[in-house]
Amino acid sequence: MKIASTFVATILAVLVPMQAHAQAKETTVKVAEVPALTWAAWMGLPDSATVGDTKVSFDISSFKSSGDVLLAVQTGQIDIGPTAFNLVAAAYATTKSLPIRMIAGVGDGTTAVVLRPDSGIKTLQDMRGKRVGLVRGSNEFFKFEIALGSVGIDLRNDVKLTTLSSPTDQILALQRGDLDAIVTYAPYATKAVQMGGVLADKINATLMREAGVPTVIIANENFLKRDPTGAQAAINAYVANWRAFDKDRPRWVDTYLKGASGDRGLMLDAVKTLPIQWDMNDGAMLSGEGDGPVSGATRQRRKVMMGTVRTTRAGGALTGWQRTALAFAFPIVVIAVWQYVGQKNLLAHGLFPSFTTSIDAFWDFISGSLGTSPYSGKWLSSVGASFQRIMIGYVIGAVVGIALGLMVGFYPKVRYALHPTINAIRPVSITAWIPLALIVLGIAAWSARPMPTEG
């Protein structure tokens, strides 16, 4: 009997921990982060967190912009992350259904207009005819367009708009005097001021009043259904970070600098006045009971914008197959017209070939199957010759450009000597250089000369 009791106890001692371990759950949440001070809480998520009996690991991926995050969440590449409300609104306006859900709003952002000191701009009305630099597709672009529209100014027609690829490019263009104003966000607005710009306080107040658009947290719907615990863990960790940042602003900056570069002193100046806002409670996010410290004006703007989105969708959204059909319809019509005009000799006295004739000639150029031209089967060698010229030109241009760039950056005398010339040729488009190059260099190329034929 004693032996039997000992045996049962031993079995239980082995099985009970195994059963407890089997009941313990583990899940991984794919989280997006964008290097921005206002979204630094995502950059500081821990490796894992525990909710009840579930261990949640966070797999964090960095994205260049909020638009990239929106696409990644739509496709399921990412489970949850931050984006701009205007991008979500635009996506809903053009797509009948999206596999995403907005689960929280996060304040109004930090958009700011920075001016050149002698720009003469004091109000939004003064922007008419001025040179303004924006990053196309950004939240700032959308906000500024709304603000200008509120005073009857069309961003694309009434303003000399320059689109740039990054806030850093905006600041440099403003410093050079190429722009009268830029629209950017923290900490770049602070950096622009340190480099000689001036904050447009009156315009910025109007911008937030007339065009304040909150940022939001979005999640993939399938993920929310599959793993609500993981989603809740991500939000809990996010809110915990913001609460810590509110008490310790240097920690906010240090968290940001772990995933981005910048001047720590500049960042500390920027976060001194940045508000910390979220539209949720960490335990009530998924039930829709958030009541965080966001103003009534923000909530009212959100209602107005969502009403606009519903109206747009109801008025003219196309289904997926309709968009696909339209995408194929145009090239099919072009090919049909091409074939008819060429076959009937309706253009250029019969010298314009039909579509099928062009396809036959192209195939002969590649394979040499017809052998009707000196260039039959010469496609590969022609591509090789073109590639060689491109690479030689690229290497020469890169060596000269990098060398001059370094000299301009390090030596003021070189910069003052070359700066006027560079600014003079900068506006010339790439295609405009082609005829100039043909005039100077000619079009002679041995590979392009007619090949001799026998007989």
Image (cartoon, rainbow, N blue to C red):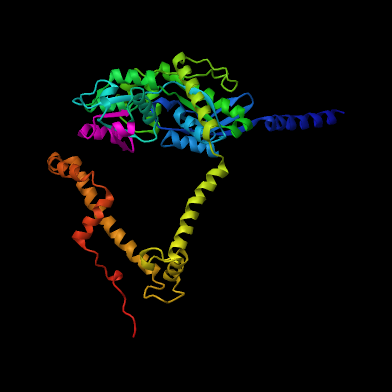
Of residues 378 and 35, the one nearer the viewer is 378
**Which x, y percent locates residue 308?**
49, 26
Q: Is residue 295 visible?
A: no
Of residues 395 and 446, the one nearer the viewer is 446
Q: Is residue 182 magenta?
A: yes
Q: Is residue 385 visible?
A: yes
Image quadrant where residue 38 sits: top left
Which quadrant of the rendered structure holds the C terminus?
Answer: bottom left
Q: Is residue 116 above or below residue 389?
A: above
Kindly identify the residue that appears in the image at 24 percent across and 67 percent down: 444
Which quadrant of the rendered structure holds the N terminus?
Answer: top right
Of residues 135 and 104, the one nearer the viewer is 135
**Which x, y percent locates residue 337?**
46, 58
Q: Residue furthest right?
A: 1
Q: Which residues are magenta?
A: 155-183
Of residues 421 and 126, the one nearer the viewer is 126
Q: Is residue 394 above or below residue 233?
A: below
Q: Is residue 136 above or below residue 115?
A: below
Kindly identify the residue that appears in the image at 56 percent across and 26 percent down: 233
